[in-house]
Amino acid sequence: MVKVFERPKALADVPTHYCPGCTHGIIHRLIAEVIDELGIVDKTIGVAPVGCAVLAYNYFTCDMQQAAHGRAPAVATGIKRVCPDSAVFTYQGDGDLASIGCAEIVHAAARSEQITTIFVNNGIYGMTGGQMAPTTLPGDKTTTSPYGRDTSKQGFPIRISEMLATLDGPAYIARVSVHNVANIVRARKAIKKAFEYQLAGKGFTLVEILSTCPTNWGFTPIEALNKVKSEMLPYFPLGEIKDIEAGEKK
Amino acid sequence: MGERILMKGNEAIGEAAIKAGCRFFFGYPITPQNELPEYMSRRMPQVDGTFVQAESEIAAINMVYGAAGAGARAMTSSSSPGISLKQEGISYIAGAELPAVIVNIVRGGPGLGGIQPGQGDYFQSVKGGGHGDYRLIVLAPANLQEAVDLVTEAFDLADYYRNPVLILGDGLLGQMMEPVEFKATKLRELPAKEWATNGLRNHGGKTNIINSLVLDPHGLEEHNIRLQEKYARIVEAEQKAEIVDCDDAELAIVAYGSTARIAKTAVTQLRQEGLKVGLIRPISLWPFPVKDFEKVIPTVKSFLTVEMSAGQMVEDVRLTVNGRKPVYFYGRMGGIVPAPEEIAAQVREILGGAK
Amino acid sequence: MGKVTFTEERCKGCELCTTVCPVKIVVMADKINSKGFRPATVSDMKKCIACAACARICPDAVIEVEK
């Protein structure tokens, strides 16, 4: 008998505080798998956000910094400039990255900072109890859009990947999902490519990952995966949205 | 002897940082300190350092957090409104016990205020300005040589105590030109930064975490108790002030920074008139130089605090004097710099019994 | 041909693994773990093909797969 799948070493062997079925757990593991596969845990430094993943600093075995809300790309800039041979990643939710941290992510991307951002998009603020996010879909009910997101008063969701792809700085931007195993495998590939581009000095990389929040969506974990497939995919199309190695922008 | 170079204050501060081994500067333009980031953008590449014009003052202080957490000597600068923006970041730096040097070239406030010098950020620097029970070491130079010396010391203090240090300047200091000498000084023994997040391979494989979150209240209280113990050590060891002519003084002027320099001229003038006047010039605003005050409170009959503000440091003077002697106040706001004669007139009024 | 091991104490009973097994042998157990969750388990190990689909969708790295 040979092991074909086990907990990656870069994932700390501790229970997490995430809700049952929360896709943060899958995404953490994919990042750890990639760190293991590339053999870079000794030179990786991760930056945890404010949000449900604030405790991410306890869940990876590499060096970690916890950043103020939205500021992870700036913190990562400081780290990578000091340690240019390291692999630096930020792990951010939709409030952290697309709301309070919108300037930081745009400018880190524009400066083509050699960092990798993992953007966990579940269209809601989990940690604070289910408020509307910049990526909440029109019509969706949250605790601050109790009648459903009314675009005439509360605006439209932001497609971060497409927006950042208009910049010349990014080297690789992809949107993936983790709502079934086939997409989990593709997500892992995208994360690996993003880290590889960073290690090769190609520039800023970002992987947006469509994710669930069963608790605040009011669904079971299984139902929540279905919401990603039936409602999020049409608004947030999957694919490699920018790849400097692939020639022209898509 | 060292070479003396005529430099603008903002630039001298930048050069002092580079001479102190700072190789990471993150800043954003704001008057009256623009020459500092501009100077760093020229000098850092020359010394293989890093200059980043950040997208905002908020981004800049967070870049300092990251760089300091990775073990580097990092610095940012701004002026009053920009320092307000940095407050959350400064609280994080203090909470995570990171070394950092922050320079505030103070302008008139509140709000957008003006671009002339001021001292209205004393409260922000010494009593806050971010959230939580933390303290900043605050150093207030009164001339450019002192600014250079204090910047050099600031990096050592920051590393030694793992705490942010604020250089509280003002628009006068930032813009004036004076000859300065960059002395090669080794100020104190500093331990290696074993706690830095520069990759497991650089510190024996043990995971390092830079963090200020402690959700368990008992744990957070313990953390705060340790911080307070650190601050008590700083209070004991790092007070700094200059006492001028107080041995026989009937009145002592209390002033810091550019205002103290102007007050010194007033003291000279008043002494020539036969009035027994001295000056206490706090150089460390936090820790407040209580020990120096205790030397003069027994014999000095009254104190006149002079500030370019509505009166902020005067509250700490009153706390320190603690009712033993009267404490008067004179201030100018809006960016107006008082003339020596204004201060002298106030002293004459007090000593003449008119106040 | 395949063997999966579930670290039941880490399972939060989210049931995602039960939806992806191609030979439909992943089920929820009849017991509760010490955290109060009903863990996932395997009903018929002989049928396991070690595809690791269950392990890949598990958010808590509960599942180890051998071949």
Image (spheres, grey):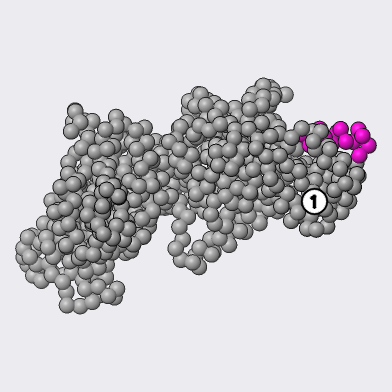
Q: Residue at x 75, y 54 (%)?
A: B318
Q: Measured along the vertical axis of the image, is residue B95 above or below residue B11?
A: below
Q: Residue at x 53, y 54 (%)?
A: B131
Query: Residue B26 at x, y = what percent?
Result: 48, 35
What is the quadrant of the N terminus of chain B in the image? top right
Residue in front for this viewpoint, A64 or B337: B337
- Taking the magenta stretch, the answer to whether it contains residue A14 is no
Instruction: Classify residue A113 by image quadrant.
Output: top left
Disc 1 is placed on an element classified as strand
Q: Residue at x 90, y 36 (%)?
A: B271
User: Which residue carries the number 1 mark?
Assistant: B327
Query: Residue B135 at x, y = what percent?
Result: 60, 52
Residue in front for this viewpoint, B280 or A232: A232
Q: Residue at x 10, y 71 (%)?
A: C43
- Taking the magenta stretch, the answer to whether it contains residue B269 is yes
Q: Chain of mark 1?
A: B
Residues rendered magenta in the picture: B261-275
